[in-house]
Image (cartoon, rainbow, N blue to C red):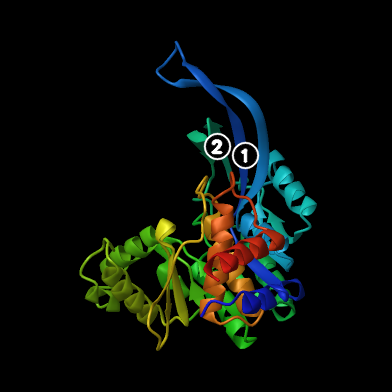
Amino acid sequence: MYSFASHKKIISKFHKKKILVIGDVILDQYIRGSVSRISPEAPVPIVLEKERFFTPGGAANVAQNLKALGAKVVLVSRMGDDLEGRVLKNELINKKVDTDGIFIDKKFPTITKVRVLAQHQQIVRIDREKTEESIDKSILDKIFQFIKENMKKVDGVIISDYGKGLITPQLVHFVCGLALQNKKIITVDPKVEHFNYYRKVTSITPNLKEAENAIHNIKITDPKAYVLGVHTEKLKTDADIDLAGKELLKYLDLESLLITLGERGMRLFERGEKPVSISTKAKEVFDVTGAGDAVISTFTLSLTAGANKRQAAEISNFAAGVVVGKLGAVAVTKEELLIAIKGYSVCVS
């Protein structure tokens, strides 16, 4: 049952927690301007630039969310030896995120996403990445060693999988083995193609589209899979979502599964429990970029602070509601989270 007092107590413990974040880091660049005419050279709008700025994206955004919520963070990843990497590292240092676990890969350009916006609408996105390049073994060895040295020092682990080459079956197996051995909470923000990697973790947090695609992929790659009981790959009704959630929970042998449903809120699945529906708390949806990062950050941090799965899901739902009201992959602060929960508490009382 919803309780502001219990949520506040959980959030008050955030500053005592330390989270290890492993995943693909991205530099997000935003160019904002206005459009008043179409180019005479081609049928495209001319954007008159007014400002540009950078924010940490991918796993780096997960890290900055945790930091904004008061937690200590150790970020593990790779980036290129380039200007974009230096900009990203400076952004993280400015936000007081520990970057000792980010290793330079000279064969790998720092992943960059440039978004051009006008009148609050995204006009185009330009991506720079080279994900087919395998990680140098010497760098991978350093990553494994760093994770091993830090596992006992943290309260929980987040794998932020953006499918950019860092997260492999070998790495996930290593991390999960260490986490289970040290009795650490481990959660995953999943990539569709990698669902089979994440067996026996504490929780995964796919959105609805990712859950649908995961069922499709599992049916193809594993014909004997439990999810064959799901006869539709488009999860349109609550009954469809419930069946898919239960089957994915069983197939991956998870403690819990949290499916985010956009304006429909969230659906939480736990072993031996009935599915729980959590309605959205967003007052205004301005930009959904970074909502998934906010969810897994707050959900994981809440679990390490003693929340049960439902309480953690409720708190993360409030965090997502704050983030979608902002532009870009912007972190939610502890103060903003408390204000959102208190405001809702007043409304329902």
- The outermost residue toward the front is 349
Q: Is residue 209 visible?
A: yes
In the rendered view, would you say 295 is above or below 17? above
* Crowd rating for badge 1 (residues with CA inside 10 Å; few <14, some 14–19, many 20+): many
Q: Secondary structure at mark 1?
A: strand
Query: Is 281 situated above or below 270?
Result: above
Label of residue 29 in the image: 1
Q: Is residue 162 left or right of residue 97?
A: left
Counting from the top left corner in percent of width and height, residue 158 is at: 59, 69
Q: Tag count in the figure?
A: 2
Q: Could you tell me if the residues under marks 1 and 2 are in contact, i.e. CB atoms within 8 Å? A: yes
Quadrant of the drawing holding the C terminus:
bottom right
Q: Write down the quadrant of residue 278 in the picture.
A: bottom left
Question: What residue would you read off at disc 2?
Answer: 115
Q: Nearer the viewer, residue 289 or 348?
A: 348
The residue at the point 61 percent across, 48 percent down is: 108
Q: Secondary structure at mark 2?
A: strand
Where is residue 131 shown, x and y percent of the image?
51, 50
The residue depicted at 26 percent of the width and 63 percent of the height is: 233
